[in-house]
Amino acid sequence: GYKWNWVLLRQTRPLPASTQAIPIPEKWFKYSSTSGDFIAQMPVEPRITEQALTIDDVQVVNNVALALTQFAVFAVSYADLPPNISGSKNLLDRVRKGVLDGISGKLKSNSNISHKRYPGREFHATAESGLYTSRIFLVNNRLYQLVVVGVPGKVSAVEVRWFLSSFDFAVKR
């Protein structure tokens, strides 16, 4: 079993008069994680947290860089997995299923992807908290996940693509 829990905080700021999607700021924050060996562009400087993550009854530390805006959450997380889990068959599919179960989401699309020849999944879902877009990658024993949860009609597809395409990881040899 795979259990994943995202805690999203609802902000109480008033909504702007305009109902148009938020334009991409001229300059996003370039976040670089030395311990996570990744970089990503985020709309604001992220808050760094740790969460317990349970995969196949093994608990690991999930390190999360979380950027909150008025209408969306942008996050990059990574967890170092023991070899018996990271080498297990269908891990990425099980992770996706665990995420969907954890957010009570309905899968809208799913595709196999890769980055630097490492396997990944991209999927889109709807959940009570909003539209959910995620990419997950398995790099050796490290599991990376990128997440955008946004209010429908308030976060543009351009913003989501900008964030997802800005992500890169270093591969330790």
Image (cartoon, helix red, strand yellow):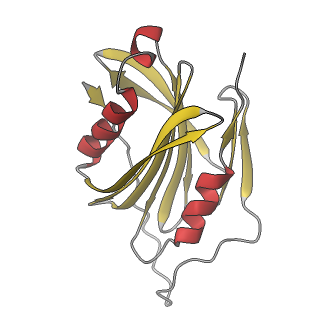
Q: Which quadrant, please, contains the N terminus? A: top left
Count all numbered tags in the image, as a single digit.
Answer: 0
Horizontal side, residue 26 vs residue 146: left or right: right
Residue 14: x percent and y percent?
Answer: 45, 78
- The image shows residue 4, relative to residue 44, as above or below, that is above
Residue 22: x percent and y percent?
Answer: 57, 77
- The image shows residue 129, relative to residue 5, as above or below, that is below
Horizontal side, residue 158 vs residue 6: left or right: right
Tell me what residue is drawn at x 50 percent, y 84 percent: 16
Which quadrant of the figure has residue 32?
top right
Tell me what residue is drawn at x 65 percent, y 72 percent: 24
Tell me what residue is drawn at x 46 percent, y 80 percent: 15
Tell me what residue is drawn at x 73 percent, y 55 percent: 29
Which quadrant of the figure has residue 107?
bottom left
- The image shows residue 153, relative to residue 38, as above or below, that is below
Horizontal side, residue 10 vs residue 23: left or right: left
Q: Which of these two is toward me, 13 or 52?
A: 52
Which quadrant of the figure has residue 118?
top right
Residue 25: x percent and y percent?
Answer: 70, 71
Q: Which of these two is toward me, 143 or 28?
A: 143
